[in-house]
Image (cartoon, rainbow, N blue to C red):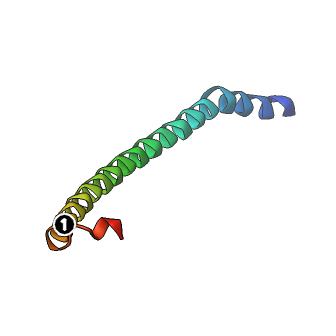
Amino acid sequence: MEPLELIFVPLVVFVAVVLPLWVVMHYVTIWRREKRDRQKITGTQAELESLADRLERRLDVIEQLLDAEDPRWRQR
């Protein structure tokens, strides 16, 4: 075998088989990571919305108590 064939054959195999698999697996990994991150963000967003609703209800109760105690408190 010539020295050129010793280099050419493995190079063709690498470019034809290994490199495409490597690229596909790279992007599959990226897509999975993005999906996982989107799920985390969605969960965190739902928690924050729940917390905001609870805080809004608490604030409404506090305002009702203050209105009952001193109706002019908003003017101060």
Expressed as whole percent of the image width and height from the top left, the position of residue 2 reads 85, 30
Which residue is nearer to you in this view: 19 or 38?
38
Which residue is nearer to you in this view: 18 or 66?
66
Identify the image quadrant of the N terminus. top right
Expressed as whole percent of the image width and height from the top left, the position of residue 57 reads 20, 59
Expressed as whole percent of the image width and height from the top left, the position of residue 75 reads 34, 66
The residue at which mark 1 appears reads as 67
Whether residue 2 is visible to the viewer of this picture, yes or no, is no
Quick check: 42 left or right of 3? Answer: left
Quick check: 44 left or right of 71? Answer: right
Q: Is residue 44 depicted above or below 19 in this figure?
A: below
Q: Residue at x 21, y 60 (%)?
A: 60
Q: Quadrant of residue 14?
A: top right
Q: Residue at x 30, y 52 (%)?
A: 49
Quick check: 32 left or right of 46? Answer: right
Q: Is residue 69 depicted above or below 25 in this figure?
A: below
The residue under label 1 is which amino acid type? Asp
Identify the image quadrant of the C terminus. bottom left
Q: Residue at x 37, y 51 (%)?
A: 40
Whether residue 75 is visible to the viewer of this picture, yes or no, is yes
**Helix, strand or loop status at disc 1:** helix
Which residue is nearer to you in this view: 21 or 50?
50
Q: Is residue 57 depicted above or below 10 in this figure?
A: below
